[in-house]
Amino acid sequence: MTDIAGGKEATVVRALEEDIIFGRLPPGTRLVEDALLGRFPVTRHVVRQALVELERLGIVVRERNKGAAVRFLTPDEVRQIYEVRELLQRQAALAIPLPAPPALIGRLLDIEIELEGHVALGHLRGVHECNDRFHLTLFGACGNAYLVGSIEHYMRLSLPIRAKTLADPENLAVSRRHHRLMIELLKGRDNWALAQLCIDHLQPSKLDYLDRAEQESDAA
C-alpha cells in the first residue's frame, strides 16, 4: 500500500513540477487542495505529501493558515541565488582534473545525443532532465560530493527561472553550444576557461527573468 501511495505522490509531484517550471502555474499561484483533488484521483494525504515534497524542492512555499503557493522569487532573491550558483560552479569547474578521462567525455556526449532527440520531438521535460543530468555529471567530476549537492540544491531553487528559457529555441541553441564547448574544454588543460564558461552559461536565464520582472514593474 505504501508503494502505491508513493507512486501516486510521485505522479502528482512530477505533474505539478512540470506545470511550474514551464510556466503553466505562474509564481504566486495558490495550490488549493480541493482543486488538486479534483484534478488527481488521489487522497488528501497524497496531495499534502506531494506539496511537502515540492516545498523541499524549493519551488513551492507553504504557510500556516494560508496553504501552499508556487514560489515567487523577487529580483533580489534571483540575484542572490545566482551569485551563490556562480561561486559553487566556478569552484567545481576549477577542481575538475584536466584533461578529463574519456569515460566522462563519453557520458556527456551520450547525454547530448539524448537531449537532441528530445529537442527534435519537442519534449520539454526530457530537455530539462537531460540538461540537469549534463551539469551534474560534469560537476560530479570535481570529486566533492558536498559541493555537487550544494550545486544541485541551488539548481532546484532556480528551476522556474532557468527551465523556462529551455523552451525558447534561441536560448536553447545557445545552451547547447555551451555544452559542446564545455566538452571540448574538458579535453584540454584550461580550468579557468571552463570555469568562466560555466559562469557565462548561467547568465541568459538570470537576465531573462530580471528583464521580465523589470518590464512587469514598469507596466504596473
Image (spheres, grey):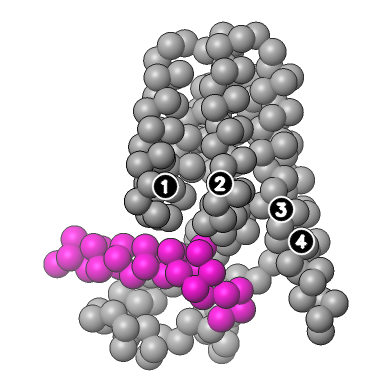
Q: Looking at the picture, tell me which residue is in the foreground, 121 or 207.
A: 121
Circle 4 sits on which residue? 210
Q: CA distance from mark 2 to mark 3?
A: 14 Å
Q: In the rendered image, which residue does mark 3 sit on?
A: 206
Residue that appears at 55% across and 64% down:
59
Q: Secondary structure at mark 2?
A: helix
Say whether disc 1 or disc 4 marks the residue closer to the N-terminus. 1
* In this view, the mark in front (2 or 3): 2
Which of discs 1 and 3 lies nearer the camera? The answer is 1
Residue at image location 41% in from the left, 40% down from the top: 115
Between 20 and 33, which is closer to the camera in this rendering?
20
Q: Is residue 210 left or right of residue 61?
A: right
Q: Position of residue 150 (x, y in %)?
A: 59, 41
Dot 2 crowding, Cα within 10 Å, few <14, some 14–19, many 20+: some
Distance between the alpha carbons at the discs numbered 1 and 3: 22 Å
Q: Secondary structure at mark 4?
A: helix
Residue 119 is labelled as 1
In magenta stretch: residue 105: no
Would residue 37 appear left or right of 72 to someone viewing this image? left
Q: Amino acid at mark 1?
A: Val
Quarter of the image where the C terminus is located? bottom right
**Label 3 element class:** helix
Quarter of image, res 159: bottom right
For mark 2, what is the residue?
172
Whether the residues at callouts 2 and 1 have beta carbons within 8 Å, the answer is yes
Identify the magenta region: 1-29
**Displayed quadrant of residue 29:** bottom right
**Mark 2 and 4 residues: CB-CB less than 8 Å, in contact?**
no
